[in-house]
C-alpha cells in the first residue's frame, strides 16, 4: 500500500506556520489536490484551528482538518491525540498529503520517533519556520544562539533557546520568514548562523507563506539516520518534558470577554508592556471605535499584525442598508439570540503566551483596556472614541 506523505510545520511561536498552512490549503483547492491536516495549539482557545477553519477549502469540507488544542503535540497526551486524529483522516481515503502544524513550543523529537514506526504514512519533511526578525532583534542576527545554549548547558538550564535550536537541528528544510523587514547583510549573518546549527538543511527565504504545493510531493522520506545520535542524546533529557504541557517556563493566559477594547488605552498598553518576553499572542477582538468588524490579533517578536477577518452578525442586522432578505435577517437573529452577551456575537478571545514572569503583567494590562460601564453607556450613545490605530488594518508596530 502506498504511504501518504506527511509534512510537519515546526518553528517557534509566531514564526508563520499558520500563514504557510493557509497558503497550502488555498493551493490545494485551486489545483484540485486534496490535502488534510492537523493543527495543534497549546492554549485552550483553538485560535489557529478557527483561522484555518475560515479558509474556503476547509469550509467546504470539514473532514480535512482536525484541531488538537489545550496540549502539546509532543507530550504523551498529544501523541495519543495525534494517533487518533490520523486514524480519522485515513478513513476518508481522499487525502494525497497530510500537513501537521505544531504549536510553537512543540519539540520535534517525539514526533520523529512516532512517524518512524508508522506503516500507513511516511514523514517526508520537517519544515522549520524561523522568524528572522526575532533573531535579528533578540539574538544579534542569530549569532548569540549557540553561545546562549552553551551557557545553558554549563548551568544545567533548559529554556526557549534550547527549544529554538533543537527545532532547527531536527528540520529537513528551513524557511526564514519576515525577511523583507531586515537588511540583506543581517539576513546573510542569520543564514550563516543557522547553517552552522544544521548544515544538512537547505535554508530558504519565504514571504507570505508562498511554497509550491506540487513540489512537496517530490520530497523523499525524512532521513532518520541523520538525527539518530541527536535523539539518543536528547531523549533522556526530554523524558520529563513530554509529561509537561507547559515546559521551558512558558505560561499561557486566556482572555475571554464580550466587551470592546478602548482604542487609545489598547494602543498605550501595547507600547508600554509588550516586550520580547511575550513570545506570542493571538485571537479575535473588537474596538469600540470600529464595532462593525471582527479583528484578528496576531503578535510575535514585539510586532503586531491586525487583520479584519469579518463583520459581526450584530453589525449586519444593525445596518439599515444591509441589503439582505428578511429570511436571512431572521436566521442571523436566531443565531445571535444563542449568544450570552449584551453585544450579540461580538467578543474578545485572546491567548497570551510568554515567560512566566511577564505574561500576567501584560494580560492584566490588556484587561484594563476593556470599556468600563460608563464607557459602554457612551458607546451606546454613539460616542466617538479616540482611535490612534492606522485606518488600514495591517502591521503597525515593531
Image (tube, grey):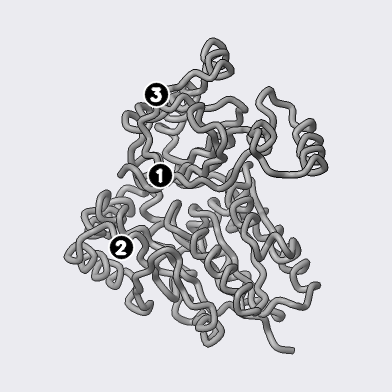
Residue bearing mark 2: 179
Q: Could you tell me which secondary element the residue under label 2 belongs to?
A: helix
Residue at 68% x, 62% y: name it: 58
Residue at 57% x, 13% y: name it: 377
Residue 114 at x, y percent in the picture: 63, 70
Q: Residues within 10 Å of mark 2 (few under 14, many from 20)?
A: some
Residue 324 at x, y percent in the picture: 72, 44
Q: Which mark is residue 386?
A: 3
Q: Quadrant location of the C terminus?
A: top left
Total numbered labels:
3
Q: Could you tell me which secondary element the residue under label 3 belongs to?
A: loop
Q: Left or right of 352: which side holds 316?
A: right
Residue bearing mark 1: 392
Question: Does 233 appear above or below 262?
Answer: below
Q: Is residue 372 visible?
A: yes
Q: Nearer the viewer, residue 10 or 288?
A: 288
Q: Which mark is residue 358?
A: none
Residue 8 at x, y percent in the picture: 55, 68
Residue at 36% x, 53% y: name it: 161
Q: Nearer the viewer, mark 2 or mark 3?
A: 3
Q: Is residue 84 visible?
A: no
> Residue 330 is drawn in which quadrant?
top right
Q: Residue furthest left?
A: 185
Tell which circle, 1 or 3, labels the residue nearer the N-terminal end: 3
Q: Nearer the viewer, mark 1 or mark 2?
A: 1
Residue 305 at x, y percent in the picture: 42, 46
Separation of marks 1 and 2 at Cα, in angstroms: 22 Å
Q: Could you tell me which secondary element the residue under label 1 belongs to?
A: loop
Question: Does 251 appear above or below 131?
Answer: above
Amino acid at each position: 500500500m502506498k504511504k501518504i506523505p506527511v509534512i510537519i510545520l515546526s518553528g517557534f511561536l509566531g514564526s508563520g506556520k499558520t500563514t504557510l498552512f493557509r497558503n497550502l490549503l488555498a493551493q490545494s483547492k485551486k489545483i484540485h489536490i486534496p490535502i488534510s491536516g492537523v493543527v495543534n495549539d497549546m492554549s485552550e482557545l483553538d485560535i489557529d484551528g478557527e483561522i484555518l477553519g475560515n479558509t474556503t477549502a476547509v469550509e467546504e469540507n470539514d473532514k480535512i482538518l482536525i484541531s488538537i488544542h489545550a496540549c502539546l503535540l509532543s507530550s504523551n497526551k498529544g501523541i495519543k491525540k495525534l494517533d487518533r486524529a490520523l486514524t480519522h483522516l485515513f478513513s476518508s481515503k481522499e487525502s494525497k498529503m497530510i500537513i501537521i502544524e505544531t504549536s510553537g513550543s512543540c519539540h520535534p523529537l517525539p514526533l520523529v520517533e512516532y512517524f518512524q514506526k508508522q506503516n500507513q504514512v511516511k514523514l517526508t519533511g520537517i519544515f522549520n519556520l524561523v522568524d528572522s526578525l526575532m533573531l535579528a532583534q533578540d539574538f544579534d542576527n542569530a549569532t548569540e544562539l549557540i553561545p546562549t545554549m552553551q551557557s545553558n548547558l554549563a548551568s544545567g538550564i533548559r529554556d526557549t533557546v534550547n527549544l529554538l535550536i533543537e527545532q532547527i537541528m531536527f528540520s529537513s528544510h528551513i524557511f526564514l520568514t519576515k525577511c523583507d523587514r531586515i537588511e540583506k547583510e543581517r539576513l546573510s549573518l542569520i543564514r550563516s548562523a543557522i547553517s552552522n546549527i544544521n548544515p544538512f538543511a537547505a535554508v530558504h527565504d519565504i514571504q507570505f507563506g508562498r511554497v509550491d504545493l506540487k513540489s512537496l510531493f517530490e520530497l523523499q522520506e525524512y532521513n532518520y539516520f541523520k538525527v539518530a545520535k541527536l535523539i539518543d542524546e536528547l531523549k533522556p533529557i526530554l523524558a520529563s518534558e513530554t509529561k509537561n504541557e507547559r515546559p521551558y517556563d512558558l505560561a499561557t493566559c486566556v482572555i475571554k470577554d464580550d466587551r470592546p477594547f478602548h482604542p487609545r488605552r489598547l494602543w498605550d498598553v501595547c507600547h508600554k508592556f509588550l516586550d520580547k518576553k511575550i513570545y506570542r499572542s493571538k485571537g479575535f477582538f473588537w474596538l469600540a471605535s470600529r464595532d462593525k468588524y471582527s479583528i484578528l490579533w496576531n503578535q510575535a517578536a514585539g510586532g503586531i499584525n491586525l487583520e479584519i477577518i469579518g463583520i459581526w452578525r450584530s453589525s449586519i442586522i444593525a445596518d439599515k442598508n444591509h441589503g439582505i432578505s428578511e429570511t436571512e435577517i431572521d436566521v442571523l437573529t436566531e443565531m445571535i439570540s444563542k449568544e450570552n452577551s449584551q453585544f450579540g456575537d461580538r467578543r474578545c478571545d485572546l491567548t497570551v503566551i510568554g515567560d512566566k514572569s511577564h505574561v500576567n503583567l501584560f494580560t492584566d494590562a490588556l484587561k484594563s483596556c476593556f470599556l468600563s460601564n460608563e464607557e459602554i453607556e457612551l458607546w451606546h450613545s454613539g460616542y466617538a472614541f479616540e482611535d490612534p490605530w492606522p485606518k488600514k488594518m495591517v502591521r503597525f508596530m515593531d
